[in-house]
Amino acid sequence: MGMFLNSIIPYERYKNISKTRFFVDKTPLIDEIISAVTMDGQQYLCITRPRRFGKSVMANMIGAFFGKVFDGKDIFNTLKISESENYKKHINQHNIIYIDFSEIPEKCSSYDEYISRFLDGLKKDLHDAYPQIVTDSHKAVWDILTEIFQKTMHRFIFIIDEWDAPFHMPFISNEDHQKFLIFLKALFKDKVYVEFVYMTGVLPIAKYSSGSELNMFLEYDMAMSERFSEYFGFSDLEVDTLYKIYDKSVKKAKITREDLRIWYNGYHTAAGERLYNPRSIVSSLADNQLKSYWTSSGPYDEIFYYIRNNIEAIRDDLVLMISGEGVKAEIQNYAAASMQLNTKNEIYSAMVVYGLLTYDDETGEVFIPNQEIMNQFKKLLMSKDSLGYVYRLANESEKMLKATLRGDTKTMAEILKFAHDTESPIFSYNSEIELSAVVNLVYLAARNEYRVEREDKAGKGFVDFIFYPERRNADAFLLELKIDSTPEEAIEQIKQKDYTLCFKGKLGEKEKYTGNILAVGISYNRKTKEHSCKVELL
């Protein structure tokens, strides 16, 4: 075994993962890859997903299954792949070359130092495995591999994790990027020693390979490609199973199944499914706590990085998206990693690729997927004054919440007037959706203390907003909107349709909320251009 050739690393990593409490069996992916290679002749597969979606876990799984180093039956005999007719034929029967391009040598400061780690390491591995064949270390690694194949007929499975890592490294230039693509082409394209290449990363090849460097790869992403979609991210059924394990293994469960849906679900796939972020699910259940596990590892994880070049064009869209609305977009993968994110479609494409937005192929719209990512948008809106009116209104939202809880309808109306006087088309209130989006913005700070649900089922209908308090003894409130009507009519609707039932637990259960319940009515008169507010204790 070597550093790259028939490395023990993927086996050890996957073995450790398979023993964990919240492990999910995704081994049918192996069967599908075998089918793609042997039946469809697809030797070059590139699967791209946002960070934290299990790409490295799947790469380790593939290495542990195919690699010759250790007998993987101790892992796979109890997993779904063991039921396949391909199981005995392929388990631990192949030479693998496993490369994680995110790893760098010590004190690395140049592309040459970076790539030499892989070239020198792989040449050493090949020499150790084939000492009678590999006698000249100055030969190109692809020439050495070709010579090995000619003399032994040995082929190799290449497993490449984080293929796009060099494009994010500060010491690697644009010129070096092109060198890297040429390196990959020389290593893989039309090479007889390649059994197949399984490559994964965040960014699409198409952006970087404008010519024919890597045109042998078939690319599969989350937004546009149906194939392989079920293997990256967790489905509802998988989370159901994990939640049962969690519920049985903790002394006091602090998370509900519905909490997991709200916080971590919502990533649309081209196959029409909605998936959960796997890292966040596992971390939340292990910690017995709901929180954001979105950790930043650089500018590509920061929302402002994407929008900074065209704030004016997408500012109104941000208001709509934080209210739960979708925004029309043409997602183009070739633009997703553009160094110049100028147009709305380029910006939204990049944010989908990095997992900050999700794309619904049926509606052609981008959305904020869940509460975890919504919190990142909230931080943006309240911290970047370059967002103009959005920043100013977001920072009025603490005052709006306090005014609502104490029934100060005069202050509430003043804040809404301040919002309406902003020169932006969204404040024309051509529909209740726009009014709703603005109300959502002026209550943005409430998300620190409340779970805010919009257009949610309650009693005998659907209420515009429900504010579920995080603290059991805090006041909860229901908010209903009206255009060309009165706040009194809005509150009457709350009463008649028994919206307050949403705060009641099931029969016999301890009440979840013990504070007051408030009914909040907000109306806007298009003739007088005035807002009216009313708060009533129910």
Image (cartoon, helix red, strand yellow):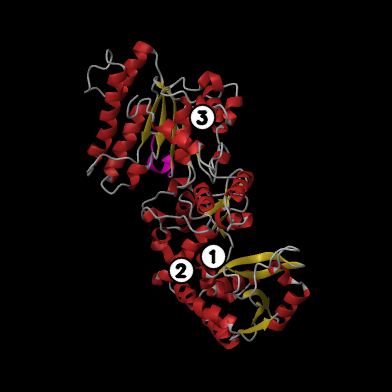
Instruction: Assess whether residue 208 is covered by the magenta stretch.
Output: yes
* Residue 184 locus on image (x, y percent): 35, 32
Q: Which residues are magenta?
A: 203-212
Identify the amino acid type marked 3.
Ile
Label located before the other in sequence (1 or 3): 3
For residue 38, above or below residue 360: above
C-alpha distance separating marks 1 and 2: 10 Å
C-alpha distance separating marks 1 and 3: 44 Å
Of badges 2 and 3, the one in the foreground is: 3
Query: Pointer 1: what residue?
Result: 322
Label located before the other in sequence (1 or 2): 1
State the quadrant of the C terminus.
bottom right
Mark 1 element type: helix
Identify the amino acid type marked 1.
Ile
State the quadrant of the N terminus.
top left
485 or 13, nearer to the observer: 13
Instruction: Assess whether residue 287 is covered by the magenta stretch.
Output: no
* Residue 204 locus on image (x, y percent): 44, 42
Q: Is residue 446 left or right of residue 453?
A: left
259 or 33, nearer to the observer: 259
Tags 1 and 2 touching, CB below 8 Å: yes
Label located before the other in sequence (2 or 3): 3
* Residue 399 locus on image (x, y percent): 51, 80
Query: Pointer 2: what residue?
Result: 381
Of badges 1 and 3, the one in the foreground is: 3
* Residue 318 locus on image (x, y percent): 51, 65
Query: Pointer 3: what residue?
Result: 75
C-alpha distance separating marks 2 and 3: 47 Å
Identify the amino acid type marked 2.
Leu
For residue 125, above or below residue 335: above
122 or 429, nearer to the observer: 122
